[in-house]
């Protein structure tokens, strides 16, 4: 059985508006007025706690508060400030028709992932949805993928592939020993993803079924 794991933000959905506005909301609570939205794109992909510490040199206490305030806005409003990328649903249906198991592997909290997929009417296309936990025990892409393996014990790693849009996806896949296909329309840097060892590149969702067919 072959399985495809999709990242969410930047791969299946353009979530930039909801994420950046929620980051601005959190920063404002901590006394920072950030008007340059492009600086906040780095929050799309990696765990929020790590991003607040790295980008704004927050202490652990500050980062925890920032994540709390972020989720305060995101859970009510930001979660729906997103759009499904063109042809994403069509691609998933094509892959299911070809016999692939379809999974989601995201660093976004799992409950949010399910809400978003349900919002766009595609939750029923996924055989498994794995995301982060609110307590931080499962937050990195590697940890999320390890959870996937725990739930999909019957699927060999050699039959799995991750589809993502950032270097965090590539590195996470490498750490657990599965290939990673990267898409170029998301939020990651293509050269950075190539250097990290991306196994294949897609410029649109329509290319993905053929690329996967050559890999798995």
Image (cartoon, rainbow, N blue to C red):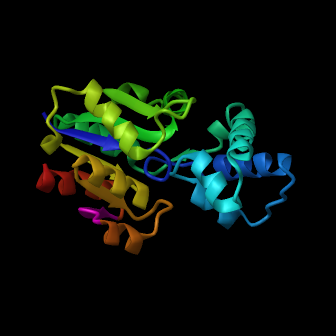
Q: Where residue 92 sits in the image (x, y, percent)?
A: 32, 40
Query: Against 159, is 31 above or below?
Result: below
Residue pictured at 39% horizontal, 30% vertical: 129
Residue closer to the observer: 201 or 191: 191
Residue 154, relative to residue 182: is it above or below? above
Point 74% across, 33% down: residue: 72
Q: Position of residue 18 (x, y in %)?
A: 66, 46
Residue 182 percent location from the top left of the image: 34, 59
Residue 27 drawn at (x, y percent)? 78, 51
Q: Residue at x 20, y 36 (%)?
A: 100
| Span colored in magenta | 197-202
**How many callouts does the rendering have?**
0
**Considering only vertical position in the picture, is 20 above or below 34?**
above
Specify the quadrant that holds the N terminus: top left
In the current view of this chain or complex, which residue is farthest to the right? 31
Asked whether, in this view, residue 112 is left or right of residue 213, the answer is: right
Does the magenta-highlighted stretch encompass residue 143?
no
The structure residue drawn at horizontal position 30% and vertical position 55%, both measured from the top left corner, is: 206
Tell me if residue 195 comes above or below residue 78 in the rendering.
below
């Amino acid at each position: 059985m072959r399985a495809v794991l999709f990242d969410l933000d930047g791969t299946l959905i353009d979530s930039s508006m909801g994420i950046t506005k929620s980051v601005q909301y959190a920063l404002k609570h901590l006394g920072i007025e950030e008007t340059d939205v492009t600086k906040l794109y780095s929050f799309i992909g990696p765990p929020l706690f790590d991003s607040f510490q790295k980008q704004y040199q927050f202490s652990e206490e500050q980062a925890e508060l920032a994540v709390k305030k972020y989720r305060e806005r995101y859970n009510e409003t930001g979660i729906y400030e997103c759009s499904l990328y063109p042809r994403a649903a069509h691609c998933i249906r094509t892959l299911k028709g070809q016999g692939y198991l379809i999974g989601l592997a995201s660093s976004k909290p799992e409950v949010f992932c399910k809400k978003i997929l349900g919002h766009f009417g595609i939750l029923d296309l996924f055989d498994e949805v794995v995301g982060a936990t609110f307590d931080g025990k499962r937050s990195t892409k590697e940890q999320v993928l390890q959870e996937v393996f725990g739930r999909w014990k019957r699927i060999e790693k050699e039959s799995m592939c991750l589809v993502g849009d950032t270097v965090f996806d590539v590195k996470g896949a490498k750490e657990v020993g599965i290939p990673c296909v990267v898409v170029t329309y998301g939020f990651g840097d293509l050269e950075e993803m190539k250097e990290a060892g991306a196994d294949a590149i897609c410029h649109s969702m329509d290319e993905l079924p053929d690329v996967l067919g050559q890999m798995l």
